[in-house]
């Protein structure tokens, strides 16, 4: 079975109990994605090892969600 999940690098902004806010580029628009449709983690090799505003992170989500949000 082929998975439609994709990992993309985004700029982390904020997280609530229900959604995560990211940006595709520095200074770009905020993009909110429900946590039920994605996972977000610090980028591998990040020396701080935690999500922090303005830092690169890896967002994992189905291709359909990423397309809807304009991220791919």
Image: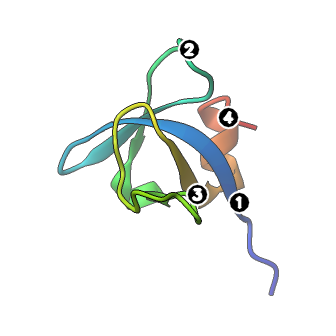
Say which residue label 3 marks: 61
Please report contact status of discs 2 and 1: CB closer than 8 Å, yes or no.
no
> Dividing the picture into quarters, in which one does residue 48 lie?
bottom left
- Residue at horizontal 74 percent and vertical 75 percent from the top: 3
Q: CA distance from mark 2 to mark 4?
A: 12 Å
Say which residue label 1 marks: 6
Please provide percent x and percent y for residue 10. 58, 40
Left or right: 52 in relation to 26? left
Q: Assess disc 1: are there few (<14), some (14-19) or many (≥20) residues with their C-alpha within 10 Å of its C-alpha.
A: some
Residue 39 visible somewhere in the drawing = no
Q: Assess disc 4: are there few (<14), some (14-19) or many (≥20) residues with their C-alpha within 10 Å of its C-alpha.
A: some
User: Quick one: 12 or 66, which is closer to the camera?
Assistant: 12
> Dividing the picture into quarters, in which one does residue 30 lie?
top left
Q: CA distance from mark 3 to mark 2?
A: 20 Å
Circle 1 — which element?
A: strand
Q: Assess disc 3: are there few (<14), some (14-19) or many (≥20) residues with their C-alpha within 10 Å of its C-alpha.
A: many
| Mark 4 vs 3, N-terminal side | 3
Please provide percent x and percent y for residue 57. 52, 49
Say which residue label 2 marks: 28
- In the image, which disc is placed on residue 26? none
Relative to 22, does residue 48 appear above or below in the rendering?
Answer: below
User: Quick one: 56 or 63, which is closer to the camera?
Assistant: 56
Please report contact status of discs 1 and 3: CB closer than 8 Å, yes or no.
yes
Please provide percent x and percent y for residue 4. 74, 66
| Mark 3 vs 2, N-terminal side | 2
- Residue at horizontal 67 percent and vertical 29 percent from the top: 70
Say which residue label 4 marks: 71
Please report contact status of discs 4 and 1: CB closer than 8 Å, yes or no.
no
């Amino acid at each position: 079975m082929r998975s439609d999940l994709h990992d993309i690098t985004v700029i982390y902004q904020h997280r609530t109990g229900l959604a995560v806010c990211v940006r595709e580029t520095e200074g770009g628009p905020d993009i909110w994605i429900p946590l039920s449709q994605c996972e977000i983690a610090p980028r591998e090799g990040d020396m701080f090892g935690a999500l922090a505003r303005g830092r690169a992170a890896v967002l994992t989500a189905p291709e359909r969600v990423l397309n809807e949000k304009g991220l791919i």
